Image (tube, grey):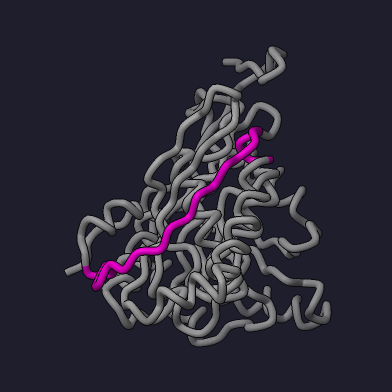
Amino acid sequence: MSGETAAGETVVGETRAGFIAVIGATNAGKSTLTNRLVGAKVSIVSQKVQTTRSRITGIVMHGAAQVLLVDTPGIFKPRRRLDRAMIAAAWAGAADADLVLWMVDAERGLDAAAEGILDGLRGQDRPVYLALNKIDRVPRETLLGLAEAFNAAYGFVETFMISAANGDGCAHLLDRLAQALPAGPWLFPEDQLSDLPERMLAAEITREKVFERLHQELPYSSTVETEAFRQQGDGSLRIDQVIFVERDSQKPIVLGKGGQTIKAIGSLARRDMEPLFGKTVHLFLFVKVRDGWADDPERYRAMGLDWQP
C-alpha cells in the first residue's frame, strides 16, 4: 500500500491513517499542540477557558502516516446547555477515535479536574496516551512524580513530556502516535489541513479575535457566522461575517468607540486568514443581536454540536 505526496512523490511502504482524540481540561494546550503539529492555525487559541466549542480535526502528514488530530472542547464542570454540548462533543470525539491523547497541564497536576477525566477514561475502550504539557514551567523531579502518579491511576500506553508552546518533545510524540495508527489508506487529500469547511475556519479565526479583544463574560455570549465566502474576479476572497451577541447593550462593546474595536478584530482576523487561504482577504464584519442564541438548536447545528435538552 502506498500514497502520493502533494509534490507527486510516491510514499513507499504501508500507509497508515487514523483519528487521535486530543482531550483534556480547559487551557491544557490541546489547540496549541494541534496547530503546531499541523503547521497552520486550524484551531483557535486563547488564554480564556472554554474557547474550543466543537470538534475540529487537524490533518498532519508524517511520512507514510496521515495523523488526524481531533481537537476537542475542554472538559470541565458544566453550568449551561452550551457547556453540556461541548463536553458531550469531547467525549464523543474520544469514543469515535482510534487513539486518545490526554493532555494534562503539568502545573495543575492531578487535581479535581484530572480526577474527573480519569473517571471518564475508565469507561473508554480505546488506547490512551498521556502528554504532560508545559514542562518548561515545572521542575523535572515534579514531572517524574506526576508521571508516576498518573500511571498508577490509569494504564497509559505511553507517557510523553512536552511543551506545545515551544515544541519540546512534540516531534517524538508525533513519531510515536503515527506509528500506533492502523494500516490503511489516507482518508483526506494530502494537502488538506482540516476537516472544517473554509467558511467555518474563517468564523473560528474571527471568534478567536473576539476572545482576544473583549473581556469578562462577553466572549461567551457571542458567536460568529460566515454569511458569504466567495472568490472574486481578481482571485481575492470576500468574506462577510456576523458577530452575534445576546443583548442590545453588548453591541456597542463589540463595535467600540468610532468602530475601533470591530476594526481591530477584523484586521487581526484578516492577518491570520490570508496565509491560511493563500489569498488576499476582504473581510466585512457586522454585529447583530440574537437574543438567546445559546438556546437555539439551529446555532448548535451550525457549530457542529448536538443539542442538549
Determine the image quadrant of residue 274. Answer: top right
The boundaries of the magenta stretch are 275-295
Residue 291 counted in the magenta span? yes
Who is closer to the viewer here, 20 or 240? 240
Residue at figure coordinates x 66%, y 33% from the top left: 278
x and y percentages locating residue 136 in the rendered image: 81, 73
Q: Nearer the viewer, residue 264 or 141?
A: 264
Q: Residue furthest left?
A: 309
Q: Is residue 103 above or below residue 55?
A: below
Residue 30 shows up from this direction: no
Residue 127, compared with residue 197, is above or below; it is: below
Q: How many marks?
A: 0
- For the residue pair 193 and 99, the one nearer the viewer reads as 193
For the residue pair 130 and 22, the one nearer the viewer reads as 22
- The x, y position of residue 97, in whole percent, is 43, 47
Horizontal relation, residue 16 to residue 243: left or right: right
* Residue 146 left/right relative to 200: right
Residue 128 % position (x, y): 52, 58
Q: Quick one: quadrant of the C terminus?
A: bottom left
Q: Can the viewer see residue 215?
A: yes
Kindly identify the residue that appears in the image at 32 percent across and 74 percent down: 246
